[in-house]
Image (tube, rainbow, N blue to C red):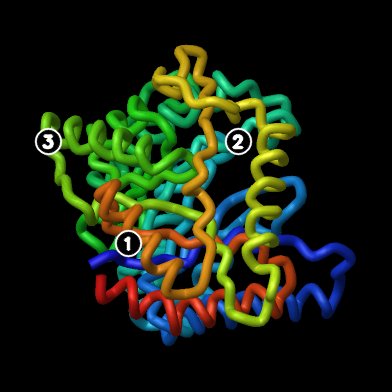
Amino acid sequence: MVKVWGFEFFLASEGLAGQELVDYFNFYVDLWVRAEELGYDGVLLSEHHFGGGYSPSPNLLLPMIAARTKTLRLGVMGMVAPYHNAWRLAEEAGMLDVISNGRFEFGTSAGIPSEFAKIGLEPAEARARYEEALQIIDKAMKEPVISHKGKYWNFEDMPIMPRPVQEDMPRWTTVISQESARKAARRGSKLATGFVPTEEVKKVFDAYTEAAAEAGQPTGPDRLALRRQVLLDVGDDPDASEHAAQFSEGFRQMLENNDWRVKKQTSGKALDTPSGTHGYALGNEEFIAGKPAEVAEQILEQCHQSGAGHFQVVFAGAHTPAAVARAWEVFGKEVIPLVRKG
C-alpha cells in the first residue's frame, strides 16, 4: 500500500501583516490538522529562507500540529543542515519526537544555490558542511553521548538530550542522483526524490537498494518516497487542461531561468559533480494533472514503476487559501481512497 503525505511549502502572501498574518498562519495550521481526518498518513513542511514562503523555522510549527492530532506523522523535508549546528538539529529532533509522542520524521537537505548566494555560501562548502553534519546527526540518533573531530565541528563527550521516543527514528534524505542515493543507503536513511523523470527515479531507487543491501541496511518500498506536483481538475474549470499545461511550462521556465542546476536535456551522467554542485533535468511526469481518478491512476503507475512506497503530494498552482484548502480536501476525499485500493 502506498502511503500518502501532504508536502507543504507554506507560500507567502504579499501584503499580509499584523492580525491578517496571524490569521493566515492559523489557517494553515488548521489545514494541516484536518489532514489527519482526511486520511493523509503525514504532513511534511520544508525549510526555506529569504522570501517566497513562511518557513524559515518549520520546527516551530510542528508542535502546534502535534498538539491537535494523534496519528498523523510529522516531518520536515528537510532541515537545511549547512545553516545549523548539527548537534542542535539532533537535539531538536529528539524534542520533536517527544512532543509528538514518537511521530517525528527527521529529514535533512543540503539546500539550494539561490539561498546560498544570499549569504555568500559556496555550494562546495555547503555540501561539505552537509556531509559532516550527517555524520554527527547519524551518530546522535544512535548514541546518547557523542564525540566528533572534523573541519566544521569539534567536541568531545557531548550529551544529546532529550532522547527520541522512537528507537529508530526515521531519517529521510532528498536526492536527485544515484550517487547521493547510494550515500543515503549506506547511512541507513530513507530516500525521497522528485523533479527527475520516473525512469530516472527508478535508477536512483535501484542504486539505493543495491547499496543498502551491500551495507546490510533495510530495503523495500517503505524506504522510498516519490514527490510530485499535482494539479487537480475538480470539474468547474472548462480550461483545466490548458491551465495545467501553462503552469507546468511556466514552472519549468522559472527553474531554468533561476536555478543553474536545471539541465534542459537529460544526460546519462551522475547528477552530482566532484565540486559538490549538482543538477537535474525536469521530467514531464513531475506534473500529475487531471480529475481525481486520473490523478490516482498516475500516482499508482509512477509509484509501481519506480518502486516507491510513499507519495508526497505538492499542490501545484494553488496560490490562494481557498484553492489550497480545496486541493487538500478533494485530494483527501477523492484521491487517497483510490490510491489505498491500488
Question: Which quadrant: the N terminus?
Answer: bottom left
Q: Amino acid at mark 3?
A: Ala
Q: Residues within 10 Å of mark 1 (few under 14, many from 20)?
A: many
SS at circle 3: helix
Q: Residues within 10 Å of mark 2 (few under 14, many from 20)?
A: some
Question: Which quadrant: the C terminus?
Answer: bottom left
Q: Nearer the viewer, residue 258 or 116?
A: 258
SS at circle 2: loop
Image coords of residue 72 (percent x, y): 38, 75
Would you say residue 146 is visible in this rendering?
Answer: no
In the picture as drawn, the residue positioned furthest to the right comes out as: 15
Q: Nearer the viewer, residue 143 or 305?
A: 305
Image coords of residue 336 (percent x, y): 38, 75
The residue singled out by tag 2 in the image is: 112
Disc number for residue 300: 1
Q: Amino acid at mark 2?
A: Ile
- Residue found at x 52% / y 80%: 330
SS at circle 1: helix
